[in-house]
Image: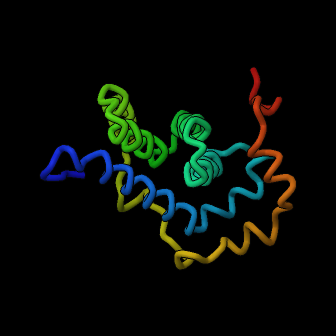
Amino acid sequence: MVTTDPALAPAALLAELQQLCDMVLRSDDVKKLADFAADFDQVGARTFACLLYTFDRIQAALYWWRFAAGAGDPLAAHLLAVHHAACGNTPQARIWRALARLARFDPLLHMPTPVRDRGHTADDFVRNSEFHQIQTFMRMTTLPKELVA
């Protein structure tokens, strides 16, 4: 993203990040959330991170984006690069941008296609998930035992 006024860059990057999260949450990737607590795959981790980011749980979102990027998800690495650039953390932004490139991030290939309009709930996710389980998972203060080495 390029802006003519450097002072506008952080706000523009944060808006870009929110738009990317919105795109992820309106895509079929949201279906991975229902099984995420059991299998911890990279798409589920990235999607969960976008959900957390949307609810202003930034540190938790960063954790799951790192998890997804470490598992090889190019879009998660790109999201981390955008976040760190928006926050003015240039060294971290460069590292994550380099990792996104190493993972061969290509917006044409890796950006999920929204299948829902803004404002529509991810019907499959809501219908197939028990809210109590999702709420419990989001409030966990420690890693699930499956992720502890």
Quadrant housing the C terminus: top right
Task: Name above or below for residue 136 compared with residue 69.
Answer: below
Taking the view exactly as shown, the residue that stands out farthest to the left is: 4
> Residue 104 at what x, y percent from top left?
37, 44
Q: How many marks?
A: 0
Task: Name above or below for residue 6 compared with residue 90.
Answer: below
27 on left or right of 12: right
> Residue 17 at what x, y percent from top left?
42, 52
Residue drawn at 64 percent across, 62 percent down: 30
Residue drawn at 45 percent across, 49 percent down: 75
Quadrant in the rendering for residue 74 = top left
Task: Name above or below for residue 43 compared with residue 109.
Answer: above
Of residue 118 and residue 38, the one placed in the foreground of this image is 118
Residue drawn at 76 percent across, 24 percent down: 148
> Residue 133 at what x, y percent from top left?
85, 52
67 on left or right of 127: left
75 on left or right of 4: right
Taking the view exactly as shown, the residue that stands out farthest to the top is: 149
Quadrant in the rendering for residue 18 = bottom left
Colour logic: rainbow
Of residue 124 and residue 100, the one placed in the foreground of this image is 124
Residue drawn at 35 percent across, 29 percent down: 95
Of residue 109 and residue 34, the one placed in the foreground of this image is 34
> Residue 96 at what x, y percent from top left?
39, 34
44 on left or right of 24: right
